[in-house]
Amino acid sequence: MKKQILTVLLLAILPLGLMAHSPQKVVVTYDEETSTVKIVVYHSVKDVSSHYVKSIVITVDGKEVKQFTETKQENNETETVAVVLKNIKPGMKIEATAKCNIMGSKKGKLVTK
């Protein structure tokens, strides 16, 4: 009996896991003229209100400098954020971690020139 209940529960939960996925790609760019870091998170979804990029954390040389928290995705393919960061020098590592509200995360990084 316990095995049957467990099997039914697994079969009920499995489709939810198949629909959810982590972001596919995170692209980090830096515009030296405007000191702007732009993050584009590629995350294809059907419904931007129920499955979306819930947070994007930006670090510079391992230190958190900005966090964005979202309640829906801007469109069915991407979420984009931008922030002005002063005192960025050549050789600094800018990293962005995007997390899905259902499951998974993805990182993107850039070393400035």
Image (tube, rainbow, N blue to C red):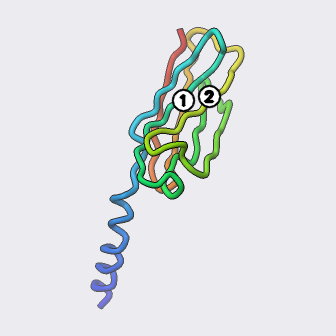
Whether label 1 touches label 2, CB < 8 Å:
yes
Q: Is residue 111 above or below residue 28?
A: above
The image quadrant of residue 24 is top left
Q: Amino acid at mark 2?
A: Ala
Q: Which of disc 2 and disc 1 is earlier in sequence?
A: 1
Kindly identify the residue that appears in the image at 28 percent across and 84 percent down: 3
Give the amino acid at mark 1: Ile
Q: Residue furthest bottom?
A: 1
Q: Secondary structure at mark 2?
A: strand
State the image coordinates of residue 21 (x, y, percent, origin top left).
39, 51
- Count every numbered label the image shows and give the total: 2
- Work out how far the residue at label 1 is from the one at label 2, CA to CA, in angstroms: 6 Å
Given residues 45 and 24, the one toward you in this image is 45
Q: Which mark is residue 82?
A: 2
Label at residue 8: none
Q: Which mark is residue 39?
A: 1
Residue 85 on image: x %, y %: 68, 21
Q: Is residue 77 above or below residue 103?
A: above
- Secondary structure beneath label 1: strand
Residue at figure coordinates x 43%, y 37% from the top left: 42
Residue 73 falls left or right of residue 64: left
What is the crowding at mark 2: few (fewer than 14 residues within 10 Å), some, or many (at least 20)?
Answer: some
Q: Quadrant of the N terminus?
A: bottom left
User: Is 52 above or below relative to 61?
Assistant: below
Residue 83 location, quadrant:
top right
Residue at 29% across, 79% down: 7
Residue 67 found in image quarter? top right
Q: Position of residue 17 (x, y in %)?
A: 37, 61
Position of 64 with respect to 105 (left or right) is right
Which residue is at a point 50% across and 43% down the rendered structure image? 75
